[in-house]
Amino acid sequence: VVFDPNQAVAKGAAVFASIPPQLRPGETGGEGGGDTGGDNDGNKGPVIVNILSKSYGVVANRGGKKVVFNLLVKQQPQPTARFVQRFGTDVPNQNEIEIQITEGDVGLFVEGRDLSKDERIADVEDVTVLQTAKLMLPQGLPAHDPIDVTFEIDNDMVLNVSAVHVGSGTKIDVKVEGVKMDAPKISNALNIE
């Protein structure tokens, strides 16, 4: 069995935090007991926040090189795990965009500051492609025509990805439930603006 040590620690902490203090071995709670983790407003216990153990992105083209642009980065809290990035078509008259959704360890969330584009970039060799989808485009588009890609993780820990061609409204939606797939050939990538 293979497991991610970061996920094991996070899950253990979440389980421990969900146990009321008075039921934890060696702790007492309630009247006259130990600290229950509450506050003066009557709120009891800790707040559990899921933290991403991996970074999630898409394969894109940057200066003629295939790279990964991470929209959600490792250590990002799940309630804020939503990011929209504007990309563009790679070449004139491109009739489709291949959206390759990736998972990897490159990139790290820093509380209170936005990451630069360079901090979100990873090498294609450093990630796993989870899923691929195609966005069909209208004919006759110029290079760099805008495409908005949104990554969002819902409360069920499902990664919801959408890609929208801004001019026509053509859209695809993809759900990734953590099942890894074999990496297909990398082609027809997005272009980083």
Image: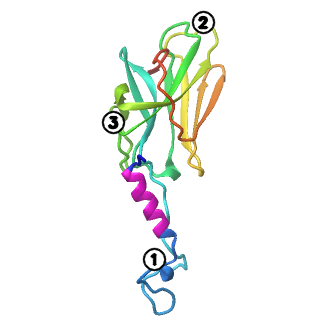
Which is in the foreground here, disc 1 or disc 3? 1
Q: CA distance from mark 1 to mark 2?
A: 61 Å
Q: Is residue 34 visible?
A: yes
Which is in the foreground here, disc 3 or disc 2? 3
Above or below 76: residue 57: above
In percent of width and height, residue 35 lies at: 43, 83
What residue is shown with label 3? 119
- The answer to which of marks 3 and 2 sits earlier in the sequence is 3
Indicate whether residue 9 is drawn in magenta. Answer: yes
Which is in the foreground here, disc 1 or disc 2? 1
Tell me the kind of residue under disc 2: Gly
Q: Residues within 10 Å of mark 2 (few under 14, many from 20)?
A: few
Tell me which corner region of the image, top left, top right, bottom left or bottom right, holds residue 136.
top right
**Res. 140 mark:** 2
- Between 84 and 135, the residue placed more toward the observer is 135
Give, as a single range, the part of the protein colored magenta: 5-16
Identify the residue shown where x is 63% and y is 8%: 139
- Between 99 and 165, the residue placed more toward the observer is 99
Indicate whether residue 102 is drawn in magenta. Answer: no
- The answer to which of marks 1 and 3 sits earlier in the sequence is 1
Q: Are marks 1 and 2 in contact (CB under 8 Å)?
A: no
Tell me the kind of residue under disc 3: Glu
Q: CA distance from mark 1 to mark 3?
A: 36 Å
Q: Residues within 10 Å of mark 3 (few under 14, many from 20)?
A: some
Q: Is residue 193 visible?
A: no
- Between 43 and 178, the residue placed more toward the observer is 178
Which is the main secondary structure of the residues drawn in magenta? helix
What residue is shown with label 1? 37
